[in-house]
Every structure is written in C-alpha cells, then in structure tokens.
Image (cartoon, grey):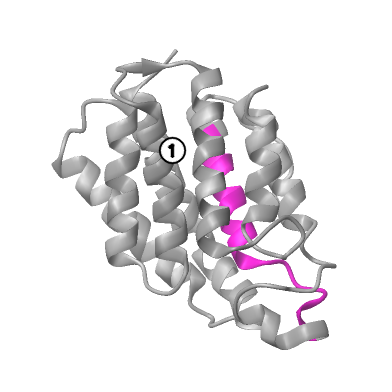
Amino acid sequence: MLDTDFFRRWMAATAAAVEREAERLTGLDSAIGDADHGSNMRRGFGTVTAVLESESPATPGAVLVLAGRQLISTVGGASGPLYGTLLRRTGKALGESGEVSQGQLAEAFGAGVAAVARLGGAKAGDKTMLDALLPASRALADSAGAARDAARAGALGTVPLRARKGRASCLGEGSVGHQDPGAASAALLMEALAEAAGENGGDRA
C-alpha cells in the first residue's frame, strides 16, 4: 500500500529531477516553443516543495491536490494548468483514504491523464505531454518502473512527430526532429514516481 509519505517523496523527487534537468527542458523548448519550460517547471515544483514542507496534508489525495493547486497558481503558460489538472484530478480520484493500492493509483492517474486530454484537446501523436502520459498510465497498473519506461519511450517517440497542438504546431514541419519538452518533463514525473517506489534504473529519455 502507498501512504501519504510515499506521495510526498514522489513530489520531492519530481522537484529534484526538474531542478536537475531544467536547462535541458528549456533547451528542448527553445527549439520549438517559448524557451521557458524548464524555468517554469522549476519555479512551480519549487513552490510545491515549499508548501508541502509548511503544510501537512493528511492523505495521498490531499498531497496531490495541494501540489496541483500550487502549480496552477504559480506556473504560467500551458504547463501550470495542465500539470495542475493532472495532479489535482488524480488526487481527487484517490479520495480520502490514508493508503491506496497500486491499482487505485493507476486508476486515479488515468482519470488525471484523461482530464489533461480534455483540457488541452490533444490526443496521442499530437506531440504533447500526452505522448508520455498515456503509455505511462496504461503501464502503471503493472508497476511504477514500467510506467517510467513507457513514459521515456513515449517522450523519445515525439522526436519524429509533427506537432499538432501548442506553440510548436505553428512550426509545421519545423517541429519534426525535436523532442517535445512537455513529454520530456512528463517522463521526469514518472521517473520520480519510480524513484519514490524504489524502482530505479533504465536509460533516460
């Protein structure tokens, strides 16, 4: 079973990964976006870390709802609302339980990913964060490590795609050959989940 401390470790590991990879994320965004994804994500998860240290959410769901609320209020552009929606919807789907099973997390995360798709109007193959999140969501029923590997493969799979959503879509064929920065950061989120679960390893996307 996964308790509140597990979800706090997940968010802390995500903040550390984003801090470590912020320049890479911004580099990816420089090629096809606004060149601010790394700095935006760093600022957002920095505030998530601070609020989780100052407050004490009592349940796994409350941890994710609080984290999502912080991202929405502190991250500009599309990243804040999309990541905030992902975490808030997942947290709400977990309910008030003090512990949740792997299966419950997978089901709730699927609800969060579906909410992101509705908000952004994107689907698989549009060269967005969903190209990492959708396969990760399906694999999460097996394990956090499987979800991490699926997200990494999904992020790498955006390289040959032509963007059909977001600012990158304005580049048309010029978006081909670049990894989507949102998919790359989504892979970091799943890497952090595997780290929190003690399932480290594999090649980085």
What residue is shown at x 64% (from left), y 24% (from top)?
141
| Crowd band around label 1 with a 10 angstrom C-alpha radius: few (<14), some (14–19), many (20+) | many
What residue is shown at x 73% (from left), y 55% (from top)?
124
The residue lying toward the viewer, choosing from 154 and 165, is: 165
What residue is shown at x 65% (from left), y 63% (from top)?
128
Q: Secondary structure at mark 1?
A: helix
What residue is shown at x 54% (from left), y 56% (from top)?
118
Return the x and y of residue 54 as percentages of the image width and height.
Answer: 14, 43
Locate residue 192 relative to residue 42 in the image: left or right.
right
Residue linked to disc 1? 90
Locate residue 126 relative to residue 66 in the image: left or right.
right
**Amino acid residing under circle 1:** Thr
Q: Is residue 38 above or below residue 143?
A: below
Locate residue 168 relative to residue 110 in the image: left or right.
right
Return the x and y of residue 48 as percentages of the image width and height.
Answer: 30, 51
- Quadrant of the snapshot with the N terminus: top left
The residue lying toward the viewer, choosing from 200 and 40, is: 40
What span is in magenta?
174-193
Return the x and y of residue 184 as percentages of the image width and height.
Answer: 63, 58
Residue 147 visible in this rendered orientation of the protein: yes
Return the x and y of residue 75 as percentages of the image width and height.
Answer: 36, 67
Examine the structure image and report whether residue 181 is included in the region drawn in magenta: yes
Q: In the picture, residue 96 is in which quadrant?
A: top left
Q: In the picture, residue 87 is in which quadrant?
A: top left
Residue 41 visible in this rendered orientation of the protein: no
